[in-house]
Image: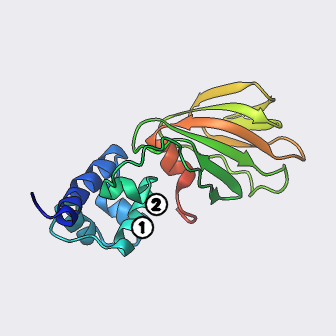
Amino acid sequence: MGNPAEDVLAGVGPRLRALRKARNTTLAALAGETGLTASTLSRLENGKLRPTLEQLLPLAQAHGVPLDDLVAAPPTGDPRIHLRPVRRSGLVMVPLTRRAGGIQAYKVIYPPAGRASTMSLRTHEGYEWFYVLNGHVRLVLGEQEFRLGVGEAAEFDTRVPHWIGSADSRPAEVLTLFGAQGERAHLAPAGH
């Protein structure tokens, strides 16, 4: 039997590569998200560089996975997802799934109308689906505008310019599903 610490560290590189590939992200794009160089990321993925905590923390955050997933920590038997809200552009996004790649589920809380950042229509690859949990949502989709209430859902091609926000003086809460492209578009660090 080998050294358990060495075995754990040896498995980090392949997991990092798999997470990056599942998100369809380049080394250069990941470098921009994490502040690590593309060269460092490549050496980590190839096992030529032993990962440090300072490197793993931003990688876990960029990939949206717990640090335990990067180092393959032994399971604790607890299937609960520990919700850690992410704040972006005035929104609160609570991840409800924790696997990399594929469809991701989030609870999104939109601030009351007028308190959100300026309305700017966005486009990106993929499809988005949301279900209104609380409040009223304003959806601008191309030249059309919709108001959705509790229990209503919408699905659309995100290549159509779109914007979503609260429709009145109360916050609006939705359950939303989107793929990797939508996740990158919604969770990109400020300034991207």
In the rendered image, residue 165, in percent from the top left (x then y), is placed at 75, 44
Residue at the left extreme, as displayed: 1
Q: Residues within 10 Å of mark 2 (few under 14, many from 20)?
A: few
The image's mark for residue 152 is none
Tell me how far mark 2 sits from mark 1, CA to CA. 6 Å
| 26 vs 99: above or below | below
Q: Which amino acid, by three-letter code, is at mark 1?
A: Leu
Residue occupying the point 32% across, 63% down: 28
Residue occupying the point 62% across, 55% down: 85
Q: Is residue 107 visible?
A: yes
In the rendered image, residue 68, in percent from the top left (x then y), is placed at 39, 56
Q: Are marks 2 and 1 in contact (CB under 8 Å)?
A: yes
Q: Which residue is mark 2?
A: 61
Q: Which residue is mark 1?
A: 57
Residue occupying the point 83% across, 37% down: 135
Q: Secondary structure at mark 1?
A: helix
**In the drawing, does residue 180 fall left or right of residue 120?**
left
Query: In this orientation, which residue lies closer to the viewer: 190 or 3?
Result: 3
Q: Secondary structure at mark 2?
A: helix
In the rendered image, residue 4, in percent from the top left (x then y), is placed at 19, 62
Q: Would you identify the image quadrant in which residue 11 lies? A: bottom left
Q: Residues within 10 Å of mark 1 (few under 14, many from 20)?
A: some
Q: Quadrant of the N terminus?
A: bottom left
Q: Which amino acid, by three-letter code, is at mark 2?
A: Gln
| 136 vs 34: above or below | above
Residue occupying the point 40% across, 45% down: 100
In the rendered image, residue 183, in percent from the top left (x then y), is placed at 51, 46
